[in-house]
Image: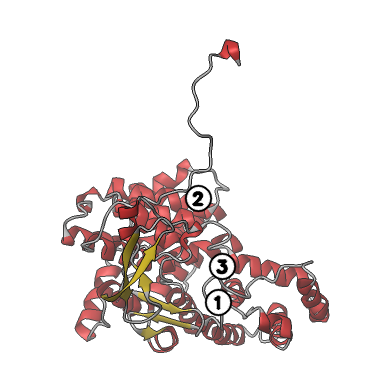
Amino acid sequence: MESKRVATLTLDDGRSVELPILSGTLGAEVLDIRNLTKLGMFTYDPAFFVTASCTSKITFIDGDAGLLYYRGYPIEQLAEHSDFLEVSYLLLNGELPNAAQAGSFKDNVTHHTMVHDQMARFFSGFRRDAHPMAVMVGVVGALSAFYHDSLDINDPQHREISAMRMLAKVPTIAAMAHKYYTGAPFMYPKNKFSYAENLMYMMFATPAEDYEPKPVLVRALDRILILHADHEQNASTSTVRLAGSSGANPFACIASGIAALWGPAHGGANEAALKMLEEIGDISRVPEYVQGVKDKKYRLMGFGHRVYKNMDPRAAVMRKTCYEVLTELKLENHKLFELAMELERVALSDSYFIEHKLYPNVDFYSGIVLRALGIPVNMFTVIFAVARTIGWISQWNEMMVDHDHKIGRPRQLYVGAARRDYVPISKR
């Protein structure tokens, strides 16, 4: 972070203040507004759309150019050549691991996948039909009650142990939430499996027969995890940082991120896109639906993005993955996929969508892939949470060692009643 220039703000009463202009490695310059307090002022920025709340070395997004980098590496390269645990190491540590580091990291995560046996009984406190995300918020938050030997947030070793535990145990908890909802017995992880294999095994295996995850499907799930691992200062990540700024334990912080992710405007977008395709129903209705979107009659889900004003770089990877999965399962003529392809073709050839920069995003395809993998709709956001856990942990850990780390305290523009005196009830 570098400041060589300043902007001068002069008020109409003649008072002025200099605001340093900061430059990062990539991206737009940032105006450091902290000196505004000298004028007794602060800024108004609903939802923080033009406010940088922190410095970070983890993820870079250029929405106009359609770029997403993890620690400088393009997401397309990582999705094609890497695996989720290697990407997790990268996000957490800043560099890709060598062979020895990768082996040690994988071994560490693998041997932390079991959860305390008493946690199995914890699940029985939920209603049988409790939404898996509700279970995730509760159980992940409760990890601090089971693993209170690593809660000193000022101890680097404690932070590392907590990071390993969360990365390893969240898939186990996710699978248990699914099994509890369906009434099936819990399946415990196997050390012979990879991260994605274990998640599939714990979700879909039963004690009655052997289960071996198919490599193509495992790779597809691994890619989904990579593509969703981090996404800069989004709503859930900002929630984790804000909770962590108070000194809350890391398990509570991750639980807060899961709660924020649960919102349909954040983690539920792929479900909404899938529902839209089901409502369209047939390729023959695509032109009518596209016109309905232009007439504000329908909403086009899975297109456009709050950040990306160009193609979502994750969408092309997910589109390819979608085809690979459907081919493996002999579902090449999958109705929803064909419908998605036609909707994409028609929309991208229409000037309305081009002018409004409504391009397919990752959610447009991920719902189809997740359904093809056999993952029920109520687990879509849970899978997202499993993937994003490493991003939340990395962001939280980065914040804890930041010299600018302070408790978060957004300001407000008060528009309520001015001072007034209390009136006794008899005189009201």
Q: Is residue 98 left or right of residue 214?
A: left
Q: CA distance from mark 1 to mark 3?
A: 17 Å
Callout 1: helix, strand or loop?
A: helix
Q: Position of residue 240 (x, y in %)?
A: 37, 57
Q: Residues within 10 Å of mark 1 (few under 14, many from 20)?
A: many
The answer to whether 409 is drawn above or below residue 23 in the figure is above
- Mark 3 or 2, which is nearer the eye? 2
Residue at image location 41% in from the left, 62% down from the top: 237
Residue 404, picture quadrant: bottom left
Q: Residues within 10 Å of mark 2 (few under 14, many from 20)?
A: some
Q: CA distance from mark 2 to mark 1?
A: 24 Å
Residue 165, picture quadrant: bottom left
Q: Is residue 425 visible?
A: yes
Q: Amino acid at mark 3?
A: Ile
Image quarter in which the C terminus is found: top right
- Mark 1 or 3, which is nearer the eye? 1
- Residue pointed to by mark 1: 362
Residue at image location 19% in from the left, 58% down from the top: 158
Q: Nearer the viewer, residue 340 or 368?
A: 340
Q: How many marks?
A: 3
The answer to whether 40 is drawn above or below residue 21 in the figure is above
Q: Residues within 10 Å of mark 3 (few under 14, many from 20)?
A: some
Mark with earlier residue (2, 1): 2
- Residue pointed to by mark 2: 134
- Residue pointed to by mark 3: 375
